[in-house]
Amino acid sequence: MFTDIHHHIIYGVDDGAPDFETAVQMLQKADQQGVRRIICTSHANPARSFFDADRYRMRLRKEQKYLQSQRINIQLAEGCEIMWMELVPRLLSEGQLLTLNASRYVLVEFYPDDKFRRIRSALESLCVAGYTPILAHAERYRALRPWRRLRELRTGLHMAVQMNADTIIHVPDLGLLSDRTPRHFLTEGLVDICATDSHNLTGRSCRMREAYRTLDRMFGAETAKEMCMVNPNCIWNDEIIG
Ligand SMILES: [Fe+2]
């Protein structure tokens, strides 16, 4: 029932699943959490290294075969989480980097200290090149504090915003003295997608169901469905988020 558009499930290509056995356990965990579709977003940092799409696809196919052999009802699709640099639109157009499930959507991340102007112009460049950028884990960037900066960023840009499930789960516990930016992002309706950004089975595991329940409790079933099912499915199907 859930679609997770940000998940480091392909083994041995980034800091996600280190080996096939761990990937299998992560898939089992996703299954228990009710995740039925996963876009396998391995890290791509073109400033540092070449994204080996052949190796990535070989391992994705191996994981798909495992799911079929065990009759686990999860579909996998390709994608990557791209650390921004100016060359990214060109690398995307050449097929050296992957959009999400071959759609117009590009999952892009920045360094936590990157300046507002750099983030904004990167998103603009992706739009101009014909893509729809999805800002990965929007809660991570200093340039988007206070929360109004995210609204400013979105103004006039055709883009989407993703927040990590773990962040959402912790939002109800934020005390008065803590940084409440993620809470404001949510209450102001600035987040389109909840995704797990799962890397492993311990500190960064797949907790989609808990995040869904938190959203349901705080904002109602419609918002929870939109963020965990409807909007992620729009991305999967290459449709415009409503
Ligand atoms: Fe990630």
Image (spheres, rainbow, N blue to C red):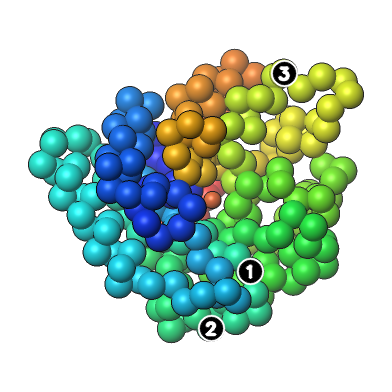
Q: Which circle marks residue 84 in the picture?
A: 1
Is 143 displayed left or right of 221 in the figure?
Answer: right
Hey, which residue is sitting farthest top in the picture? 217
Residue 55, disc: none
In this view of the protein, can residue 192 be seen by the observer? no
Give the image location of residue 66, x and y in percent. 17, 45
> Looking at the figure, which quarter contains the N terminus?
top left
Indicate whether 55 appears above or below 207.
below
Residue 205 drawn at (x, y percent): 47, 34
Q: Marks 2 and 3, Cα distance to the nearest angstrom?
A: 42 Å
Mark 2 highlights which residue? 90
| Secondary structure state at the residue bearing disc 1 | loop
Residue at (45% x, 24% y) in the render: 209
Q: Is residue 3 left or right of residue 197?
A: left
Q: Nearer the viewer, residue 86 or 59?
A: 59
Looking at the picture, how far across and down is residue 100, in whole percent? 43, 60
Which badge, 2 or 3, is on the more N-terminal residue?
2
**Residue at the image position 38 percent from the left and 72 percent from the top:** 52
- Badge 3 marks a residue whose secondary structure is helix
N-term-proximal mark, 1 vs 3: 1
- Residue 173 badge: 3
User: Contact, CB < 8 Å: mark 2 with mark 1?
Assistant: no
Answer with left or right where residue 56 lies relative to residue 201.
Answer: left
User: For the residues marked 1 and 3, what is the alpha-carbon distance in whole angstroms?
Assistant: 32 Å
Q: Secondary structure at mark 2?
A: helix
Alpha-carbon distance for marks 2 and 1?
Answer: 12 Å
Whether residue 206 is situated above or below residue 5 in the rendered picture: above
